Image: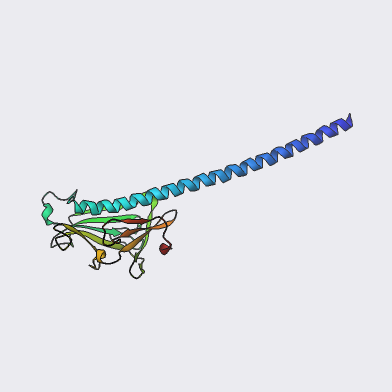
């Protein structure tokens, strides 16, 4: 009888050890699966945020091209409106941006008085994206400060009602190789402004090593 009791205890002991091993394996698999799902969700959110940011900036250009300037004073007619300026805020930019690199400042400009916009909007980059820096494509010059450019109507050689993109140094972006606007979320990617042979379409790089 004593031998049988000892044998039963041994069997029960092995059973408990085996159960603990199984639980440990299940726990490890659960943690691994949870991390995998979380990583995929973050990657999906990042892709959606970058696409939304690209569309946000593209819409500003399209609105200017279509002559739509919502929110302006009723006393201003469309023929006095020059276009819009777009400023990506750096963390060191205090004026307008409040040191918040997730903000974009959009101003509606008028002819002959571009220093006094008639409308200012503060937009937030989607999905927690942050502006890092801008890169000039022609020579890869990097600017860690705020980056701004204007989208304005023109009657120049691009047609009776064209679009002109100029950086804050009044350089025509469309006649150059454009700029990369680096954004950071789960990864570092970029919006491409004024490239592709003078196109006003906003390009997108989901991952951009130049932004590291």
Q: Is residue 44 above or below residue 144?
A: above
Give the residue at x 73% y 40%: 17
Give the residue at x 31% y 50%: 55
26 or 5: nearer the viewer: 26
Q: Residue 34: percent from the left, percent from the top?
A: 54, 44
The N terminus, quarter of image:
top right
Farthest front residue? 197
According to the image, what is the colour scheme of the structure? rainbow
180 or 100: nearer the viewer: 180
Q: Residue 150: percent from the left, percent from the top?
A: 23, 60
Q: Residue 206: percent from the left, percent from the top?
A: 40, 55
Farthest top residue? 1
Give the residue at x 72% y 39%: 18
Q: Residue 100 falls in which quadrant of the image?
A: bottom left
Task: Left or right? Give the position of 25 relative to 184.
Answer: right
Q: Residue 109: percent from the left, percent from the top?
A: 18, 58
Counting the numbered discs, the total is: 0
Q: Residue 168 falls in which quadrant of the image?
A: bottom left
Task: Left or right? Give the position of 24 relative to 116.
Answer: right
Task: Left or right? Give the position of 55 relative to 152.
Answer: right
The C terminus, quarter of image:
bottom left
Q: Is residue 167 visible?
A: no
Q: Is residue 51 visible?
A: yes
150 or 1: nearer the viewer: 150
């Amino acid at each position: 009888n004593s031998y049988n009791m000892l044998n039963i205890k041994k069997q029960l002991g092995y059973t408990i050890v085996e159960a603990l091993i199984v639980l440990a394996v299940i726990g490890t698999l659960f943690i691994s699966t949870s991390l995998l799902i979380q990583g995929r969700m973050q990657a999906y959110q990042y892709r959606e945020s970058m696409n939304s940011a690209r569309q946000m900036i593209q819409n500003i250009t399209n609105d200017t091209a279509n002559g739509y300037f919502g929110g302006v004073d009723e006393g201003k007619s469309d023929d006095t409106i020059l276009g819009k300026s777009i400023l990506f805020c750096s963390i060191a930019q205090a004026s307008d941006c409040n040191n918040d690199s997730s903000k974009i400042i959009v101003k509606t400009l008028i002819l002959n008085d571009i220093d006094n916009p008639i409308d200012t909007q503060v937009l937030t980059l989607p999905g927690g994206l942050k502006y890092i820096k801008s890169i000039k494509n022609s020579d890869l010059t990097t600017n860690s400060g705020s980056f701004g450019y204007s989208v304005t109507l023109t009657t120049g050689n691009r047609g009776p009602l064209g679009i002109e993109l100029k950086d804050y140094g009044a350089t025509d972006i469309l006649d150059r190789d454009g700029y990369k606007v680096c954004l950071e979320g789960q990864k570092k990617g970029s919006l491409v402004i004024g490239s592709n042979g003078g196109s006003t379409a906003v390009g997108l790089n989901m991952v951009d090593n130049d932004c590291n």
